Structure formats: structure tokens, C-alpha cells
Amino acid sequence: MNEGEFSSWLAGCSSEQELSLRALRALVKENSEELSEDVNSGKWLAGYIFYSKGSRMLFAMSPQGKARVTFHMMPYYGSPQLQLRYQGDLKPFLTGKSCIAFKNFSELPRSALVAIVREGSAGFLKQL
């Protein structure tokens, strides 16, 4: 997905959501270069941006409502070690077993997300 397509995908987001989604995108791209980025057109999480390797989705992000952003992290869900290490940092944001929701990217524990993207991606990709 190029920058123009990404900007079009952001249409309708609040300015805070746009800033958060751009920062989250940069974090994923900087820390897991092997993943492809596409808008999901499938039955589940349609319209979300998926970060995948082959047919395996590792991360997904989307605006949620008018003020929040949601980020799904399958490597976190699949790794008891990552859960144990970062559950405390993510607890205020967790909305499920692999998903966080937030209003502003700056309030997130960035070091935890970097580790989950780096370590989690590497672990998932080894299984392919």
C-alpha cells in the first residue's frame, strides 16, 4: 500500500485518529519489514489494515468509532511469554486477548509494542 492509498483509507478519521494510525503504521513498518500491508476485504475485520506474511495476518489496525483506534496483535495472543512480560503495560488498553484500543498513540507503552512487533513477528514468521 502506498502513501496515497493509506491517506485515502484515513478519510473520515478524526485528526487524532489519523496521527495515531500514522504512528502505529510507522512502528509496524520500522520493526517488521517482512510484512505486507493491505486493506482487508474478507468477512472478518473488513476494512481494517492487515499486516501479513502470506495468508497469515499478524497485526490489524483501524479507527474505532469517532475517537479511538484499535490494534490487533496475533503474536501477542499466541505467545504466553509476551503476554506475561507486557500484560501489565497493556492492561489499561486491552479489550480482548489480542486487541488494544486507545485514543492517542502517545499514551501507549511504545517499548512494549516495539518488542511485540519485533519478537512476535519473528516468532510467527519462523512457524511459516
Image (cartoon, rainbow, N blue to C red):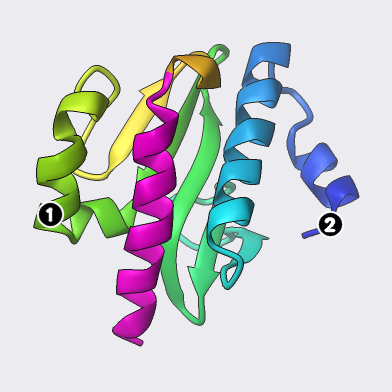
Instruction: Give the residue drawn at x 36%, y 87%.
Output: 128
Q: Position of residue 5 (x, y in %)?
A: 83, 50
Residue bearing mark 2: 2
Question: Secondary structure under badge 2?
Answer: loop
Could you say which is closer to the camera, residue 67 or residue 124? 124
In the figure, is residue 64 to the left or right of 44?
Answer: right
Could you say which is closer to the camera, residue 116 or residue 25? 116
Counting residues from the start of the chain, the first of labels 2 and 1 encountered is: 2
Residue bearing mark 1: 81
In the figure, is residue 87 to the left or right of 90?
Answer: left
Q: Position of residue 41 (x, y in %)?
A: 59, 60
Find the magenta span and give its range: 108-128
Instruction: Give the residue drawn at x 24%, y 17%.
Output: 92
Outermost residue to the right:
4
Classify 10 Å Cα crowding around label 2: few (below 14), some (14-19), many (20 and above): few
Mark count: 2
Identify whether 14 is placed above or below 83: above
Question: Secondary structure under badge 1?
Answer: helix
Identify whether 85 is placed above or below 81: above
Q: Which mark is residue 12?
A: none
Instruction: Give the residue drawn at x 62%, y 53%.
Output: 30
Residue type of the residue flagged with mark 1: Gln
